[in-house]
Amino acid sequence: MGIMQSRLKQLYIYLPAVLIVLFLSACENDINKVKAIAAADATKPIQRTTGVDVIFSDSGIVKARMLTPLLIDYDTKKDPYSVMPKSVKVILYAEDGNIIADTGYYYKEKQLISFRKNVVATKGDGTVYRSDELLWDMNKKKIYSNKKVVMTKPNGDEMTGSSFVSDDKFLNPVFQNSTAVIHVDGDLSQK
């Protein structure tokens, strides 16, 4: 019986250690599951609004109006944002122009709207800017893009750049790595 008692003593010593290891590994997995569930919940929308019409003003003066058929709010801890997945249109009153896009993202804390896919910005004078992305930083009062932008004037002149920056009224556009097509009127032949 000495061998049996020895084995029982070993079992009494090792069994609690094995149970503690199993318990701790089970807790770790549960903690990881809780973290995963919390992360998944952070990316779920907290609110869906249809037929959105937002007015942006500064010192009581209406600067712009944003229209979208669907606005989905996400409340992430670092930077809450809204998505406009079914198109967005912003009317710029100062320039009598507008910006339209297939998709938009609005970051309220940064005061930034990101227009994406088939972006067309039109000024009151008929000048049109086309890109796959335009960003409007309302705090810095500038509009820019890190993607190709094509500007077409009403007379057909065209400027293309690999990226673009301007004030928020499109008055001082600057294109990087630009090319242009300029139409010249008049008779160029010598008589």
Image (cartoon, rainbow, N blue to C red):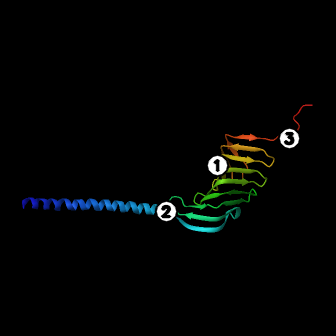
- Badge 3 amino acid: Asp
The N terminus - image quarter? bottom left
| Number of the label disc, if any, that sits on residue 145 | 1
Q: Residue at x 25, y 61 (%)?
A: 20
> Mark 3 or mark 2, which is nearer the start of the sequence?
2
Residue designated by label 2: 42
Residue 58 in view, yes or no: no
The C terminus - image quarter? top right
Q: Is residue 106 above or below residue 157?
A: below
Q: Residue at x 63, y 65 (%)?
A: 70
C-alpha distance separating marks 2 and 3: 59 Å
- Badge 1 amino acid: Ser
| Number of the label disc, if any, that sits on residue 116 | none
Q: Secondary structure at mark 2?
A: helix
Q: Residue furthest top?
A: 191
> Mark 1 or mark 3, which is nearer the start of the sequence?
1
Q: Residue at x 40, y 62 (%)?
A: 33
Residue 160 % position (x, y) = 70, 43
C-alpha distance separating marks 1 and 2: 29 Å
Residue 145 % position (x, y) = 64, 49
* 173 or 88: nearer the viewer: 88
Q: Secondary structure at mark 1?
A: strand
Residue designated by label 3: 185
CB within 8 Å, label 2 to label 3: no
Residue 148 % position (x, y) = 66, 46
Disc 1 crowd rating (10 Å Cα; few below 14, some 14-19, many 20+) is many
Q: Residue at x 51, y 58 (%)?
A: 78
Q: Secondary structure at mark 3?
A: loop
